[in-house]
Image (cartoon, rainbow, N blue to C red):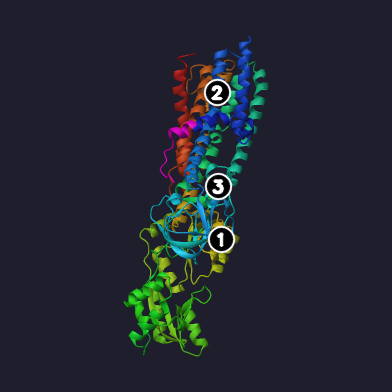
């Protein structure tokens, strides 16, 4: 995907200009109550222009009324353009995605070849080197290197394999090596790419709760100002002041917050677009918005806080156990262990695995599970197990064997130094400890400090024992941790925080993460993860980057900040328009109102025109800010409020005074 698309590409601008006129349809405009009332005012002014052409003189000259009509029309078109350019950027992304969705042949298990469009959920197809994967699915057999650049934009290939949490593949990606059997997991038209295209095109976009609330508030403002303008007529009659229809409509348009009304949809669309450019697919704008309000962040230790996976660094045999024999049983327990930790144990031993070749019938490999928290191998009559210290201790004590003091001391020392101890047993008798070490990612502590400034609590989730978890959490600057975590522990923690009124975000990739991802307010699933995880979350990270959750929160914060600052600016800049139009309406009948003409505008006509022209041109000036978002600052809510009030509140008052005066100088040259 094109992450560096400029804001105003020629083809996008042309499409947006065309859509600006299409969106004048009242059925479309009705969804934006503020701009809909401006459109009604524009229609009224059109008929006023026809009225003045027929000889009516009480409403001023045709030229003056026509200029008001033209400016109001341009105001509506500018607002439509803001929304259309945001949508056009999304559709450009969709076009690039659609190219990867072209129909491709799919080779089924029986050797027959069918079109990818005919694949149904549950079908199994075969892909070999050079093949384009025809549909979303889970690898059920084999391992392959996959080029996902068509989806993620990243050129580095990734490895996907059957079983575990890295088995998911996406239609449109390419197999670079080996052979895999894939089971289709989606129905036609419901693939990941189909959903992405619908989202970025805006077909599935619905207004977020905050956006709806703000729209209702702005609609309320509009209703109030309609009443103000209507009740102004009796006061004008009492003061023997004749106010033209053009003046009434201009006053109304300048009173209502047209700036934020014109930019509100663009801000929401741009928020989802920024997430997409960060290679995060959001299932709704609500997810991005909620990310900006997050209170608690659950982060897996491995890959997020620490670099990659733990590596074995030392072997510590128990008292009375021969070192070579301990290394031998540690290697035997890891020969079939495909985890990075298991492989690192074999590497640390510096042995050739082929030296341990034995008849396959004598081997029975025991896989790690979250419940047993250990793995190993049965070789003939010998049972070798390695795993968490408390799990192996319980195993030994259940079978009447002691937990050696020297092993207990070594476990404590390793844990206090931030390592992870793996205890090894042979026939339920403890024979020693293997030390695993983590490396904390550079700069992660500073990122957590930024989150803390925003009032976000960070929680590290790890399978480590409490001592190791405490050491790493303190070193990394995490606020809290969940040690020896099982899948249900994440769920319980999320529920506890939510019951206390907090919003929680988490990231996961496995089927066992799915319940917690669904429970969390913001659940980010990795694209490499299982189908269950991707369906449970409300966001999918195409880069499979465990730290992306932090970036998602910042994108959400930026969306809320952008909407808040532009709303502040929009309401504040109405102040100057009051000082332009109110004196213009009554200054002939009530000369004392001249004191309110602090901008010293040339005439009532130029004052009204200057105000509505500024009201129109401020919308396109602010479009880049709405699309790019305001500069993100990791500060607290109160500090953020003060900053916005100072920059956009005060700026929103001062800028229109200067702008309207400059426009008045130019307008007065022609009228």
* Dot 2: element: helix
Give the labeled residue for mark 2.
Answer: 581
Report which quarter residue 25 is drawn in: top right
Q: Is residue 11 left or right of residue 237?
A: left
Measuring 49% from the left and 23% from the top, which residue is drawn there?
A: 598
Between tags 3 and 1, which lies in front? 1
Mark 1 Cα shell of 10 Å, populated few (<14), some (14-19), many (≥20): some
Give the labeled residue for mark 1.
Answer: 532
Which tag, 2 or 3, sits closer to the chain's start?
3
Measuring 56% from the left and 61% from the top, which residue is drawn there?
A: 532
As displayed, is residue 530 above or below residue 436?
above
Say if mark 2 contacts mark 3, CB within 8 Å. no
Which tag, 3 or 1, sits closer to the chain's start?
3
* Dot 1: element: helix
Q: Is residue 227 left or right of residue 291?
A: right
The residue segment tinted magenta is 1-14
Which is more toward the observer, 171 or 429? 171
Residue 227 visible in rendering: yes
Q: Position of residue 301 (x, y in %)?
A: 44, 65
Q: Position of residue 161 (x, y in %)?
A: 46, 64
Q: Kindly identify which numbered label has been placed on residue 285.
A: 3
Q: CA distance from mark 2 to mark 1?
A: 60 Å
Residue 433 visible in rendering: no
Between tags 2 and 3, which lies in front? 3
Mark 3 Cα shell of 10 Å, populated few (<14), some (14-19), many (≥20): many
Which tag, 2 or 1, sits closer to the chain's start?
1
Is residue 437 in the magenta section? no
């Amino acid at each position: 995907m094109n992450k560096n698309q400029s804001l105003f590409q020629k083809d996008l601008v042309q499409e947006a200009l065309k859509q600006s006129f299409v969106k004048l349809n009242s059925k479309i405009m009705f969804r934006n109550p503020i701009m809909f009332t401006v459109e009604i005012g524009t229609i009224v002014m059109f008929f006023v222009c026809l009225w003045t052409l027929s000889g009516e003189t009480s409403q001023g000259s045709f030229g003056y009324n026509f200029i008001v009509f033209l400016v109001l029309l341009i105001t509506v078109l500018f607002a439509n353009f803001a929304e259309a350019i945001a949508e056009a950027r999304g559709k450009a992304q969709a076009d690039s995605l659609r190219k990867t969705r072209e129909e491709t042949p799919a080779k089924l298990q029986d050797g027959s070849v069918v079109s990818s469009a005919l694949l149904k959920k549950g079908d199994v197809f075969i892909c070999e080197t050079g093949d384009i994967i025809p549909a979303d699915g889970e690898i059920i057999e084999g391992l392959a290197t996959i080029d996902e650049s068509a989806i993620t934009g990243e050129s580095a290939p990734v490895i996907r394999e059957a079983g575990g949490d890295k088995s998911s593949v996406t239609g449109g990606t390419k197999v670079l090596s080996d052979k895999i059997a894939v089971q289709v997991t989606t129905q036609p038209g419901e693939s990941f790419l189909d959903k992405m295209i619908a989202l970025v095109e805006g077909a599935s976009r619905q207004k977020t709760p905050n956006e709806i609330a703000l729209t209702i508030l702005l609609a309320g403002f509009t209703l109030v100002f309609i009443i103000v303008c209507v009740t102004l007529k009796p006061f004008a009659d009492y003061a023997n002041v004749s106010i033209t229809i053009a003046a009434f409509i201009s006053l109304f348009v300048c009173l209502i917050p047209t700036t934020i009304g014109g930019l509100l949809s663009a801000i929401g669309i741009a928020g989802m677009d920024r997430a997409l450019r960060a290679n995060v697919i959001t299932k709704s704008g609500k997810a991005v918005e909620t990310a900006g309000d997050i209170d608690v962040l659950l982060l897996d230790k491995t890959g997020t806080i620490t670099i990659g996976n733990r590596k074995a660094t030392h072997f510590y045999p128990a008292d009375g156990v021969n070192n070579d024999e301990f290394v031998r049983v540690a290697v035997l327990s890891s020969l079939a262990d495909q985890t990075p930790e298991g492989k690192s144990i074999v590497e640390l031993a510096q042995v050739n695995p082929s030296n341990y070749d034995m008849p396959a019938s004598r081997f029975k490999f025991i896989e790690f599970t979250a419940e047993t928290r250990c793995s190993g191998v049965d070789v003939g009559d010998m049972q070798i197990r390695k795993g968490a210290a408390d799990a192996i201790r319980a195993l030994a004590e259940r079978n009447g064997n002691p937990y050696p003091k020297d092993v207990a001391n070594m476990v404590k020392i390793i844990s206090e130094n931030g390592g992870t101890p793996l205890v090894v047993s042979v026939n339920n008798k403890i024979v020693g400890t293997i030390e695993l070490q983590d490396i904390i990612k550079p700069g992660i502590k500073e990122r957590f400090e930024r989150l803390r400034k925003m009032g976000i609590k960070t929680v590290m989730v790890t399978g480590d024992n409490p001592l190791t978890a405490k050491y790493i959490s303190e070193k990394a600057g995490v606020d809290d941790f969940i040690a020896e975590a099982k899948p249900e522990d994440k769920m319980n923690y999320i529920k506890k925080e939510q019951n206390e009124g907090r919003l929680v975000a988490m990231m996961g990739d496995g089927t066992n993460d799915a319940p917690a991802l669904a429970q969390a307010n913001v659940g980010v699933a990795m694209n490499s993860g299982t189908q269950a995880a991707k369906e449970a979350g409300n966001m999918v990270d195409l880069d499979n980057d465990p730290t992306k959750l932090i970036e998602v929160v910042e994108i959400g914060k930026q969306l809320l900040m952008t909407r808040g600052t532009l709303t502040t600016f929009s309401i504040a800049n109405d102040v100057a328009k009051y000082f332009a139009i109110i004196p213009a309406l009554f200054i002939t009948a009530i000369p004392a109102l001249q004191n309110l003409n602090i901008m010293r505008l040339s005439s009532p006509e130029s004052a009204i025109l200057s105000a509505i022209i500024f009201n129109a041109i401020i919308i396109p000036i602010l479009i880049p800010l709405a699309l790019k978002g305001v500069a993100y600052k990791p500060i607290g809510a109160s500090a953020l409020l003060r900053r916005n009030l100072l920059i956009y509140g005060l700026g929103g008052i001062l800028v229109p005074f200067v702008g309207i005066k400059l426009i008045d100088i130019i307008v007065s040259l022609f009228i």
